[in-house]
Image: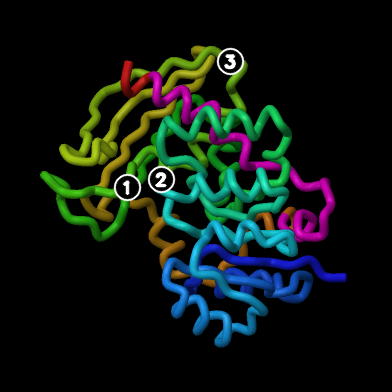
Amino acid sequence: MKSNLAILSSDQKSIDFIKKNKLSSTLNLYANSSRNIEVAQIFAETHNFKKYYGAYEDLIKDKSIDFVLNFLPSGIKFEYIYLCLKNNIKVITDYPIVSNSNDLKYYNKLINSKLINNLFLIDETNIKKLYEDSLKQNIINYTKSFKDLNKFENSLYSKDVLFELCPELFYLIYQYREKKISILKNDKTLDKITNKLTNFKCSIEINGNLKINVTLTSNSDNNLSNLDKQKQFMPDMLIYNLKDLNSFVNSKNSFENLSIFTYYPYKLFQEVLYE
């Protein structure tokens, strides 16, 4: 018997993900939601969902839901991850999981209660590659940029370059969490209104023999690596942990839980940035 899948964000990204990864072959498209109930209804009828809701909270209360696909904006995503897991609903989501320091204590509760095992993080960027490279090199230059963004002076800048851009950097740091890690800030710029980190440079030394030079910027796509530019033109590329996703939706526990790796690096960077 198929388990029931619901989506919190009634958008094209959610449907594209379901189709690309053939989730409807193993899960029932059961329910969707939107802040606008008319949008939710049209979406349900278009994509053959059984039920629809005009509030995310109402969907989460539905006891027939087994899995939720959560592609909500990062500013509100964790709140609904937490509610789903506390209501015994398994969650599939994308990076980043948390967006502010207030989420950390609740994230830690999920880890300690083992509910984190019901959270699946999609790997669209090959999160493990930077760590694998670090095993072969002593110095790594890590550069990332948001594309097509204007300068941010006095803006309502909604993204944080460190926490939005760097899953592979966080994964690397998590793997070395038992080692001595030093982070030296070279430069940082915060948005004047939202306090989001918009430009950041630092050097990270791990155990005295690995150095990572980090440059993050929100200004343009000039600093994107060739690999990042290629990914912009590969929207149909399968996720790197598709095999693990299949294990997850089939209620097996053989997958490696990626979602836990963000907690320690996030906490570490918060301490460094605002010390």
Indicate left or right for 271 with 192 as reference.
right
Indicate left or right for 178 with 36 as reference.
right
Picture quarter with the N terminus = bottom right
Q: Which residues are magenta?
A: 245-271
Q: CA distance from mark 2 to mark 1?
A: 7 Å
Residue nearest the observer in this picture, 61 or 115: 61
Residue under label 3, please give it. Answer: 179
Residue 226: where, in percent of width, then height?
39, 56
Q: For mark 2, give the secondary structure.
A: helix
- Whether 129 is drawn above or below 271: the answer is below
What is the three-letter code of the residue carrying label 2?
Glu
Give the image quarter of residue 230.
bottom left
Q: For mark 1, give the secondary structure.
A: loop
Mark 1: few/some/many CA within 10 Å (<14, 14-19, 20+): many
- Whether 39 is drawn above or below 241: the answer is below
Picture quarter with the C terminus = top left
What is the three-letter code of the residue carrying label 3?
Lys
Mark earlier in primary sequence (2, 1): 1
Residue nearest the observer in this picture, 36 or 173: 36
Mark 3: few/some/many CA within 10 Å (<14, 14-19, 20+): few
Q: Which mark is residue 159?
A: 1
Residue at left offset 74%, top offset 64%: 64
Residue under label 2, please give it. Answer: 164
